[in-house]
Amino acid sequence: MKTIQVDTTARHEQIAKSILDAKAVGQDELLGAIDLGSNSFHLAIARLDHDEVRKIASISEKVQLAAGLDENNVLSEEAMQRGLDCLRRFAQHVTEVEPHRLRIVATNALRKAVNAQEFIRRASEVLPKPIEIIAGREEARLIYLGVSHSNASTDKRLVIDIGGGSTEFIIGQGFEPIETESLQMGCVAFTRKFFADGKITAAAFEKAAKATQAELLSIAKRYKKVGWDNAIASSGTAKAARLVLQELGLADEVITLGGLEMLKQKLIKLGHIDRIEFAGVKAHRQAVFPAGVAELLTIMQTLGIDELGYSDGALREGVMYDMLGRLDDEDVRDRSVTALAQRYSMDIKQAGRVTTACARLFDEAKDSLGLDKEDGDLLRRAASLYEIGLAISHSNYHKHSAYLLEHSDIAGFSQAGQARLAQIVLHHRRKLKGDTLETVEQLGGRKLAYLCLILRLAVQANQSRTTKAAPIMLRVVRPNDWRVSVGAGLHADLITAQLQTDVAQFAKWGVSLQVI
């Protein structure tokens, strides 16, 4: 599949001007989101206006990252370079956005790539923030958030987003998703499978349709049972299809099933992607357009959709609204933590005792250890969930807890965020190993190791599971030189003895612990 290079110099100059004009509003009002899709990379910059996200600049580039995945899901050097070149151009536009008001998320192509961390490592040299790989259902949640804010409605809606490597399906009402799914089908993936030679045939459409039907089997019955009042699509495939149907006089504002069926026949008559000359299909979308139409048509047929609306808001808008919630202390991650604690019947009182101890220890150590609010939030969430593995087994429950946290679909968290949460929980008990420290530091640096140790201290101090237990205090002389003391209270001698058994464990991770 050929990759078409597009000269975006003029567009980037317009973006730069828009951002400079927006500086008059104030830098602290700007929000930024970068979405690394399987087909396109998107950048959006907005300002906050009366609690609404007002987009001031956006740009998309067709990187076709998914096209660089081989049969073993290894991302090619050529594809990596296309992505890095694009990110270098994007990076020049986010210099006016405060880092805590910028998020960079990656979707299906990097979820699948076995060498994704190599790309992320190289991208970190270009970008001011690390890339977050998000799970499919988290991508679906964010897409719905973007659509629901861009197209306000109280109806129950089905949202469909066809990407390059995956397609997300969400049923929601208002701003709340009810069902979220991500299926392994997309316009780039289907182009490689069914239209790789550029020929547009009835047979290729049929094969793409059968593949789409096979994927939909897992959700069609359940989604139809939940039901929806109307359906709406986002993404480049839907946008291009809508524009072409309007161009051909086959539809007005909505995408119609009949119109798509006629468009399919017109594409088959054209016979090759090089002959696609619709004004609504940009040159760099020609190659993936037939596959996208085949998938969209089959989705509408299978789910019984006659008309499909369109939303210009999608993932990157959802990322910004989600980030706005975090800034306003309405963080979906905290709702997710509460839901997990309830699902696995956590001992809420014990979690509260450990969380309180963690907060106190964190405050005593944060300045000396260079920890910030985000670190404190991560530690608090880990303390709230450290015992969820007890729902599986008491034996090695810390391992079960870590597994659940790393591999569950948890709204609001990236894959890396869940992995860091799991590592903190994993190391709160039993022996520490020197070789596991490397894993911890690769995920979150030395700070993550410190968070693991702080939770460990808090749990040791609350083994008696009572609020009357003697409190512990922490003084950090130097980052790797800690002093812990036990105050007056119940089980003070026992707590002291337990802490002393951890001195050798802390030493394995390079921290000198003295119990005084």
Image (cartoon, rainbow, N blue to C red):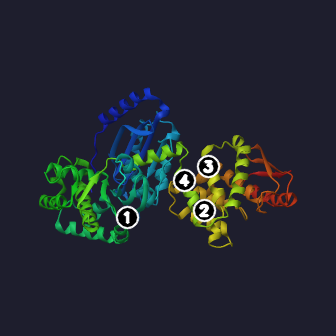
Q: Which residue is mark 1?
A: 183
Whether residues under marks 3 and 2 lie with C-beta atoms below 8 angstroms apart, the answer is no
Q: Residue at x 53, y 41 (%)?
A: 100
In this rendering, the label closer to the viewer, 2 or 1: 2
Q: Secondary structure at mark 2?
A: helix
501 with respect to 46 (left or right): right
Q: Secondary structure at mark 4?
A: helix
Amino acid at circle 4: Arg
Q: Neighbour class for label 4 at 10 Å: few (<14), some, many (≥20)?
A: some
Amino acid at circle 1: Leu
Q: Earlier in the sequence, mark 2 or mark 4?
A: 4
Residue 147 seen anywhere in this rendered image of the structure: yes
| C-alpha distance separating marks 1 and 4 | 24 Å
Q: Earlier in the sequence, mark 3 or mark 4?
A: 4
Q: Which residue is mark 3?
A: 377
Whether residues under marks 2 and 4 lie with C-beta atoms below 8 angstroms apart, the answer is no
| C-alpha distance separating marks 3 and 2 | 16 Å
Position of residue 375 relative to residue 216, above or below, is above
- Quadrant containing the N terminus in the rendered view: bottom left
Q: Earlier in the sequence, mark 3 or mark 1?
A: 1
Q: Residue at x 36, y 69 (%)?
A: 225
| C-alpha distance separating marks 3 and 1 | 32 Å
Position of residue 32 relative to residue 66, above or below, is above
In this rendering, the label closer to the viewer, 3 or 2: 2
Amino acid at circle 2: Ala
Whether residues under marks 1 and 4 lie with C-beta atoms below 8 angstroms apart, the answer is no
Amino acid at circle 3: Asp
Q: Residue at x 62, y 68 (%)?
A: 400
Q: Earlier in the sequence, mark 3 or mark 2?
A: 2
Q: Secondary structure at mark 1?
A: strand
Q: Which residue is mark 4?
A: 333
